[in-house]
Image (tube, grey):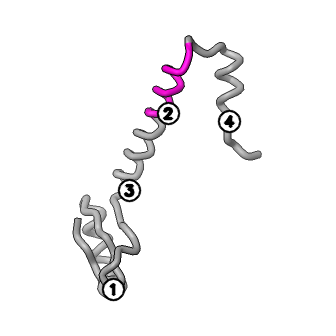
Amino acid sequence: MREVQASDAKTHLPRLLDDVEAGETLVITRHGKPIARLVPERDVRRENMDRIFAKMDAIRRRGPGMTLDEILAARHEGHRY
């Protein structure tokens, strides 16, 4: 993981985005302190999917099973209309 100063990131953003697109993760710093992280989009999607699968596994393990009505009721849990 490479660190880049904020001022350099501003100057070289197109090149840095190419590096991230190629798979590199960059940490942008200001006065030596990390302020942001640029990660390839595929890594973010993978982390999201891993989190979703972990939640699904937890649901499967928490009880003897869910009825069809419970599954249908849970599918919109947390959604705002």
Instruction: Determine which residue is flagged by label 1.
Output: 31
Q: Where 71 sits versus 33, above or below?
A: above
Using a 10 Å C-alpha cutoff, classify the residue at mark 1 as few (fewer than 14 neighbours), some (14 to 19) or many (20 or more): few
Using a 10 Å C-alpha cutoff, classify the residue at mark 2 as few (fewer than 14 neighbours), some (14 to 19) or many (20 or more): few
**What whole-number distance in Å separates the C-alpha atoms at marks 2 and 4?**
13 Å
**What whole-number distance in Å separates the C-alpha atoms at marks 1 and 2?**
38 Å
Question: In the image, what residue type sits under mark 3?
Answer: Glu
The span picked out in magenta is 53-63
Asked if the residues shown at circle 4 and circle 1 are in contact, with their CB atoms under 8 angstroms apart, the answer is no
Using a 10 Å C-alpha cutoff, classify the residue at mark 3 as few (fewer than 14 neighbours), some (14 to 19) or many (20 or more): few
Apparent side of residue 32 relative to residue 75 in the rendered image (left or right): left
Question: In the image, what residue type sits under mark 4?
Answer: Glu
Viewer-proximal residue, 46 or 63?
Answer: 63
Say what secondary structure mark 1 lies in.
loop
Apparent side of residue 24 relative to residue 50 in the rendered image (left or right): left
Residue at image point 31% right, 70% down: 27
The quarter of the picture where the C terminus appears is top right
Say what secondary structure mark 2 lies in.
helix
Which of the 4 image quadrants contains residue 79? Answer: top right
